[in-house]
Image (spheres, rainbow, N blue to C red):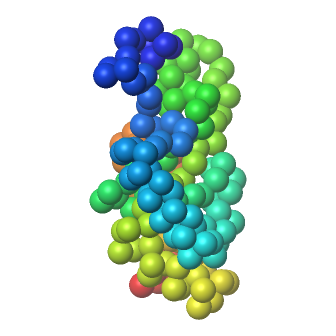
Amino acid sequence: MWRERAPPFADKPWKSIGRGEVKLGSDEERKKADESLEDKQRQYADLLTCLRVHVQDEIKEVRLSSRLTSSPVCLVGDEHDLTPRMQRIMEQLGQKAEKVKRILELNPTHPLIPKLQALCVETKEDPRMAAYARLLLGQAHLAERGQLPDPAAFTAAPGHIR
C-alpha cells in the first residue's frame, strides 16, 4: 500500500481516516474523548442495538464515532478491509471482489441521535425504527460514495414516517 511507502509526516505514519479506529488529538485529549465516548456508549446502547437489528444484513457493526463533527452517520471499514474504491477497481478489472460489510458509525453529538434514542427506549418495537435505520444507512452510503446500492428500495420507505 502507499501508506507503507510514504514517508512519515512529523514522525507520524500516514493513516486512513476511513478505516479502523481513529484517535485524534493529543494524549490527554484522546483520554478525555475515550471516556466521553464510553459514557455515550452506555447511554446509547439501546439505540445501537435497535439500529443493528434492522440493518445487520448489510453492516458489520453499529458504533459511536469519534471522527464525526457535523454529519449524523458515516461508513468506515476495518483496518484491513478493502476500500469501496478498491472493490470497484477490482470489479472493473473483471476480478471477483468479496463483499465487505462496513461499520456504521453514529455521531453522538448530532441532535438526531438523542431523539432516536428516546424513541427506541419508548417503544423498542416501533416500526419507524426500521425506516430510520434504513434512512441513516442510505445517508451514510450517499456521503461515502454518492450513490445508493438500491435506490428504489430507499425511496420506497414507509410514507407514514414522522
Displayed quadrant of residue 147: top left
Query: Which quadrant of the rendered structure holds the C terminus?
Result: bottom left
Nearer to the camera, 140 or 96? 140
Q: Position of residue 67 (x, y in %)?
A: 40, 50
Q: Residue at x 51, y 62 (%)?
A: 35
- Residue 148 visible in the snapshot: no
Q: Is residue 68 above or below residue 111?
A: above
Q: Residue at x 37, y 20 (%)?
A: 11
Q: Position of residue 97 (x, y in %)?
A: 63, 24
Q: Is residue 99 above or below residue 139?
A: above
Q: Residue at x 60, y 58 (%)?
A: 62
Q: Position of residue 144 (x, y in %)?
A: 40, 43
- Residue 5 visible in the snapshot: yes
- From this viewpoint, which residue is outermost toward the top? 5
Q: Position of residue 5 (x, y in %)?
A: 44, 8
Please state if 52 lies on the left or on the right of 73 as rendered.
right
Nearer to the camera, 111 or 53? 111
Displayed quadrant of residue 101: top right
Q: Residue at x 65, y 63 (%)?
A: 52
